[in-house]
Image: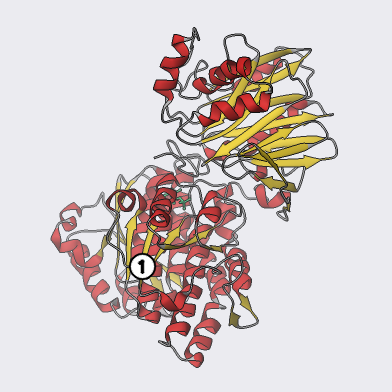
């Protein structure tokens, strides 16, 4: 997704913008640009591809400016090019604007503006915004009102920052359905798409809400909502900078795989004061779990696989029917739901367009909604009736890892809370399960100790073109997630499949070029998985199995296996996924790929 950074203050602006954009590279982009206010002019420098290209452009000249905006673009309308890169400027070159989101009615706006004489030079939807502001500045008394009037004509999503040559002491930022934060420090004020971009400069952060506008001056920030001035209480961000840097690991993804024991521990700690579950933190105020007679979960990608584990565990512990669907299907088929069906959205970014749209539709129909997300201040945290935050800290790698295991951790506690209010588990049974859950961080540590063996395995397999991942029960969402991890960072085709489905077609894929990864830890369907492994081996398959420690049968039968700690099957996804995350990571490294920013992918899919 696009990245935005803006600054106004007493410091030299350019290095702040470039450094901030670098911290946003993980969001994925294909071009970038900067606008600098300098001696009542606006200088625009843009380039295609990596930020290094922009820096090369900038090095050709000395810039002296205390106000500016920067942008990394992820193309949605118009190919990646310098012309389509942001900032966009109006005809008179006196207004420059950057944007993240999608202007759904840009064609009609463009037609109207063209009829008024505006000339367009890009194929983007964004460019209509800067011409709208230019048009409205003629008819309004202030820059802010011109921006508000322009945005009132817009359908779609936006996070924008705009500057005006004739107001060299003002930056204006605004958002609707696309994240934007404001940072304040003694030497100036900042705007960014995400906190890590400005964390080096300030921890004093205000999260812009939808339809809010921020007016940034060198020494002040004023907020307006629907034309009225409002006060906003900033949050003190506690992330240390390390948390948003690589911390000594080669890649963010590896760092975040190794952060999982701490992330799961912090997440459990947020809801387990002592040994009692308290989900009121941030969230369940308006959702009375006692009234819930069914849950419908919506999510995408990795969050969908975590939601699948949630379905299994809530059904097992709380005896409650749970249906799940991917958000992009849910939002358009919107199933018939009773008023006591809880809509549960699982989304690490809290900004996924399809998941947000499903939640908004549910709210419009009066359904109670609960969100599990990792980002405080994300859109979903202001939309859903209740919020349960994972405490994974910033996940910079595009491939979700620690947010997957922390989402499952929260789902375990939600399942226990439901079991308590519904009386499906006794207090003693709940206490026992809490004790088991509290061992998870240590179990993850144990699973991480197999990294060296997995790196070696990857060295043997990274040239293979296809993989099939098999699992049953709690092993199935793990197999699906393992396949997603492998394909999204190593670009090797991988399919996750219910082991019991093999004979219904996928078994035709088996040959020496399609290794099998089987999730074969101890479970009530373990014997079935063993027979599936025998079936595929009989057809010449090369099998790698994830098995429970002190397992005998498969160790003697298979040459390649990774052991994970023996643990209750229901809790096993938190450990069996670890070797599959590491396998995907080392396969991609063996191929020399960029694991943090895989091609074509973005960290949060804020457009449909
Ligand atoms: C997972 O590794 C991918 N990055 C992607 O599938 C992701 O899980 C999906 O886009 C959902 O994102 P969300 O959790 O922020 O909603």
Binning the other alpha carbons within 10 Å of mark 1 as few (below 14), some (14 to 19) or many (20 upward) gives some
The quarter of the picture where the C terminus appears is top left
Q: Is residue 184 above or below residue 471?
A: above
- Decide if residue 280 is on the left or right side of residue 77: right
Q: Position of residue 149 (x, y in %)?
A: 57, 27
Dot 1 falls on a residue whose secondary structure is loop
- Decide if residue 86 is on the left or right side of residue 299: right
Q: Is disc 1's CB within 8 Å of ligand 1?
A: no
From the viewer's side, name the closer residue of 439 and 234. Answer: 234
- Work out whether residue 102 can be spotted: yes
User: Which quadrant of the figure has residue 342?
Assistant: bottom left
Query: Badge 1 is on which residue?
Result: 339
Q: Position of residue 289 (x, y in %)?
A: 46, 75
- Work out whether residue 201 can be spotted: no
User: Which quadrant of the figure has residue 229?
Assistant: top right
Q: Is residue 136 above or below residue 422?
A: above
User: Which quadrant of the figure has residue 419?
Assistant: bottom left
Q: Position of residue 14 (x, y in %)?
A: 73, 25
Q: Position of residue 118 (x, y in %)?
A: 50, 10
**Residue at the image point whose x is 15% and y is 63% from the top:** 503
Counting labels gives 1
**Residue at the image point whose x is 56% and y is 78% from the top:** 439
- Decide if residue 532 is on the left or right side of residue 142: left
Display coloring:
secondary structure
């Amino acid at each position: 997704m696009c990245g935005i950074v803006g600054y106004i203050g007493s410091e030299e602006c350019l290095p702040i913008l470039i450094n901030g954009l670098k911290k946003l590279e993980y969001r994925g982009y294909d071009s970038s640009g900067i606008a600098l206010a300098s001696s009542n002019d606006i200088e625009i420098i843009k380039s295609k591809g990596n930020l290094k290209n922009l820096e090369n452009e900038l090095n050709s000249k000395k810039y002296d400016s205390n106000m500016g905006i920067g942008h990394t673009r992820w193309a949605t309308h118009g190919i990646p090019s310098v012309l389509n890169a942001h900032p966009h400027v109006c005809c008179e070159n006196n207004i420059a604007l950057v944007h993240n989101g999608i202007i759904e009615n840009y064609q009609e706006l463009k037609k109207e503006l063209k009829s008024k004489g505006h000339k367009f030079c890009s194929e983007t939807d964004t460019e209509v915004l800067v011409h709208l502001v230019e048009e409205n500045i003629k008819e309004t008394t202030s820059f802010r009102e011109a921006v508000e009037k322009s945005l009132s004509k817009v359908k779609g999503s936006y996070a924008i920052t705009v500057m005006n040559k004739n107001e060299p002491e003002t930056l204006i930022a605004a958002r609707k359905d696309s994240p934007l934060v404001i940072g304040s420090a003694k030497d100036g004020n900042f705007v960014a798409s995400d906190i890590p971009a400005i964390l080096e400069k300030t921890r004093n952060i205000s999260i812009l809400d939808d339809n809010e506008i921020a007016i940034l001056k060198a020494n002040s920030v004023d907020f307006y909502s629907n034309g009225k001035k409002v006060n906003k209480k900033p949050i003190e961000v506690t992330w240390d900078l390390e948390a948003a840097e690589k911390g000594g690991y080669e890649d963010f993804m590896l760092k975040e795989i190794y952060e999982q024991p701490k992330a799961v521990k912090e997440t459990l700690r947020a809801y387990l004061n002592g040994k009692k579950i308290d989900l009121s933190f941030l969230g369940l105020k308006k959702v009375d779990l006692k009234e819930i007679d069914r849950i419908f979960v919506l999510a995408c990608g990795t969050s969908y696989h975590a939601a699948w584990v949630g379905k299994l565990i809530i059904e097992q512990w709380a005896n409650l029917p749970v249906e799940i669907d991917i958000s992009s299907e849910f939002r358009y088929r919107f199933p018939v739901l009773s008023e006591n069906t809880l809509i549960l959205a699982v989304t690490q970014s809290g900004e996924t367009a399809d998941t947000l749209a499903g939640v908004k539709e549910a709210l419009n129909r009066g359904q109670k909604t609960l969100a599990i997300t990792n980002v405080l201040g994300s859109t979903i945290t202001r939309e859903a009736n209740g919020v349960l935050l994972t405490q994974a800290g910033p996940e910079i790698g595009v491939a979700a890892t620690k947010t997957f295991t922390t989402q499952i951790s929260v789902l375990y506690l939600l399942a226990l809370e439901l079991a308590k209010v519904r009386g499906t588990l006794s207090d003693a049974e709940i206490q026992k399960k809490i004790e088991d859950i509290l061992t998870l961080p240590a179990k993850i540590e144990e699973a991480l100790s197999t990294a060296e063996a997995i790196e070696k395995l990857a060295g043997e397999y990274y040239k293979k073109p296809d993989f099939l991942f098999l699992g049953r029960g709690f092993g199935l969402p793990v197999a699906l997630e393992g396949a997603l991890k492998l394909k999204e960072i190593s670009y090797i085709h991988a399919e996750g499949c219910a082991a019991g489905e093999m004979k219904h077609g996928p078994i035709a894929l088996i040959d020496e070029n399609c290794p099998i990864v089987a999730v074969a830890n101890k479970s009530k369907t373990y014997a079935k998985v063993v027979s599936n492994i025998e079936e595929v081996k009989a057809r010449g398959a090369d099998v790698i199995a994830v098995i429970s420690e002190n397992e005998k049968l498969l160790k003697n039968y298979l040459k390649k296996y990774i052991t994970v700690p023996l643990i209750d099957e229901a809790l096993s996804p938190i450990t069996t996924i670890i070797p599959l995350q590491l396998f995907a990571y080392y396969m991609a490294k063996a191929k020399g790929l960029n694991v943090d920013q895989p091609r074509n992918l973005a960290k949060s899919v804020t457009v449909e």
